[in-house]
Image (spheres, rainbow, N blue to C red):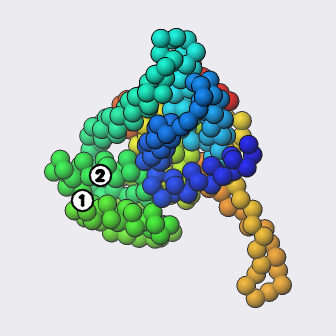
Amino acid sequence: MKAQIELYSNLLRELEMDIGTRDLTELFLEALALSIKNLKVNSPEAFLEQFRGLYEVVSNTEPKFGILNYQFARLANYSQDVVCKDKKCVKKWKHMVIKRLEQMIREERDKKVNIVKNAEKIEVDGKTILIHDHSHTVQDALVHYKNMGKKFKVIIAEQNFNKTHDNIERMHDAGIPFQVIPSYMLSHVHDQIDMVFFGAVTLKSTMNFVMSPGTHGIISEFHVIDVPVYMFIDTAKFSLWKSKKKVGVFMHKHERTHYNKPITYERIKYSHDRVPHKLFKKIVTNEGVFTPVALKKLFDEKMKKYSFEK
């Protein structure tokens, strides 16, 4: 089990870095539906046993992906009902589970539409917006503003090569005017930036967003100079369980050697940043636009309703 968790952790981290959490979830659900379609098992109970094993692995990756835990919990509850409770459905359980997965995928796509629609409540006309991570939700919101006829400019904080070029491609394809500046030189353009947009992997019970590396520093920088920072996130990404680790992200220690001296040292690298929700002016979700205080209330309500604590 430990080896499987490590394998899935590495896979999910790499995919999340390349395509973002939202598209990773949709890809995972589509792959799961295809796998179940081709699965050969002797009984529904045998399927449940295999599914529980996969659920256990996905629920313990580093970091934990809240949206995957949420969707797997929903599917686990549904599958248990279909296989064990509704005796009339035992013979067609596979068809029903796949249909449920397809419904969940459609729901996720609808949430994308709702987030973009709610983003209209943020006024961007005539503004210059800074982006840093390659959140596809943020990209979709910016493209939506452009299609609405809003006039604005984007500054891309340069960081990881692939993430930066993903932002560049999306802005170029949408015809959105943009400039690129290294993330460590943003102090030179403080007076040009009106607002900052970010996405996140998840929101933990500690009310910290798990985000791309480097985001905490940039958000803190603009918080200090009173430039509003906005979060765009699907509420299905909430990690609806009590966090057991203070950090809650993957840490990797490397043994390194100085390039021309006989010096060895330990280099520590973290997969993500943690950012307090209070540093954001507004949080745009599929369920509406929230202040940090209102977001905490929403999170607590969901914690009571959905208990996915592992």
Measured from the top left, where is residue 169 in percent x and y?
33, 65
Label 2 neighbourhood size at 10 Å, few (<14), some (14-19), many (20+)? many
Measured from the top left, where is residue 84 in percent x and y?
58, 15
Measured from the top left, where is residue 257 in percent x and y?
77, 78
Cα–Cα span, label 2 and label 1: 9 Å
Residue at horizontal 46%, vertical 41%?
34
The disc at residue 280 is none
Tally the numbered discs.
2
Q: Earlier in the sequence, mark 2 or mark 1?
A: 2
Q: Which residue is mark 2?
A: 142
Q: Can residue 165 be seen in the rendering of this structure? A: yes
Task: Tell me: residue 31, above or below residue 133.
Answer: above
Q: Which residue is mark 1?
A: 174
Tag 2: residue type? Leu
Q: Nearer the viewer, mark 2 or mark 1?
A: 1
Measured from the top left, where is residue 77 in percent x and y?
55, 22
Quarter of the image for the N terminus: give it.
top right
Residue at horizontal 29%, vertical 61%?
171
Whether the residues at callouts 2 and 1 have beta carbons within 8 Å, the answer is: yes
- Check the image and name the residue furthest to the bottom: 260
Residue at horizontal 65%, vertical 44%?
61
